[in-house]
Image (cartoon, grey):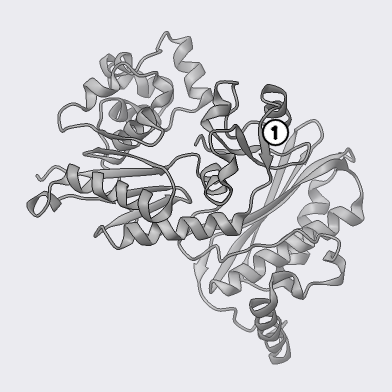
Amino acid sequence: MISKSILHLDLDSFFVSVERKHHSELNNKPVIVGGMGDRGVVASCSYETRKFGVRSGMPMKIARRLCPQATYIKGNASIYTKESHLVTEIIKNQVPLFEKASVDEFYADLTGMDRFFGIERFAKELREGIIKESGLPISVGLSQNKVVSKIATSEIKPDAMSVIKLGEEKEFLAPLDVNKIPMIGNKTFQLLMGLGVYKVRTLQEMPVEVLEGVLGKNGRTIWKRANGIDDSPIIPFHDRKSISNERTFHKDTTDITRLHATLVAMTESLAFQLRRGNKLASNISVKLRYSDFQTSTLQAKIPYTSADHILIPKAEELFKKLYNRRVLIRLVGVKLSGLVGGHYQINLFDDSEKMLSLYNSLDRIKNKYGERSVVRAVSMGARTIGRMRNPFDGEPPIVLAHRNQ
């Protein structure tokens, strides 16, 4: 079997780097990009802020306490998307097979390229070319699989390259903390530490059956990754299984009019995205998070549809069933899942040619002038609901506040 050569590429502190590219006065200064409200989170932070304990995904109010001297920026999703596309095109023109894992993270399969060109040399020149053409710093890791390459990148960042040669995977991973292994989140990390497992070396030495007994079916996957074993493929296109929209209010509320307007606006937006992507949904769910952080979700099966006038009443019905505590609400969300390809078809019992003509006309206006150019009157108060891009274009979501960058 031919050993693979998988390159992981990660744009360093991507949102911050883009801001610095356009505003050079921010260079070498602490910079934090994220939500500016009381409930905003850190989407990206410069390395100058990390010595103060700032991390992506952290509540912005905590970041402000830890590093008050930083420059705080709300960010611009359209600019970040444009810069991400620029890097994507550079990679696309250089490698035969690649995966865009997120807005700032890529994998490239370089297997077999050493017959024509040294793989390490190619990876080095690809990285240098991206930096030169995009003006953005990027770190890369090269090994025989995605997991080891990703960890190699994270260990060498920022603005550097790491190569883990075939057969050296276990040795490279052994001294690392166990939470460096993808799939080991905080909960699993705490559980492993409770068992006295702190380093990857200990995972490597444990019988796989023991890990399965503690962690279930994920135990075997974690054991394999700890031993540098991973056969996950390069996925060139992301086919979404669901789309969702959530709103965290600046202030907890019981204002039914406002809640209803937000719910309708989100459902209306999602339905338009389905039609724009030629998709139909067979499941809808509504989520509520109360001021005490208790979260409740209710879902329902529906006939395959992308029609507002079917989805909105169902969302309203689920909301009424779900909202039974009569306490302040922190967040409301709508999710459409069970997606399949297909155009909205007329329902012989409920719809008419006039209804289909109406949807076609509305969608043409929205595509031309923007999603919020035509909305239901009830949802006019929810002005910030809506998307800037097609969620079915194979690109990952732009918002990455939950990821460590």
Secondary element type, mark 1: helix
Residue at x 63% of width, y 55% of height: 244
* Mark 1 crowdedness (10 Å alpha carbons): few <14, some 14-19, many ≥20: many
Locate residue 110 relative to residue 375 in the image: left or right.
left
Residue at x 63% of width, y 72% of height: 306
Q: Position of residue 365 (x, y in %)?
A: 69, 81
Quick one: 15 or 184, which is closer to the camera? 15
Disc 1 marks which amino acid? Met
Relative to 190, residue 94 above or below: below
Q: Position of residue 106 (x, y in %)?
A: 37, 49
Residue at x 32% of width, y 61% of height: 92
Q: Is residue 233 visible?
A: no
Quick one: 30 or 109, which is closer to the camera? 30
Pointer 1 residue: 60
Where, quadrant-wise, is the N terminus in this rendering? top left
Relative to 25, residue 28 above or below: above
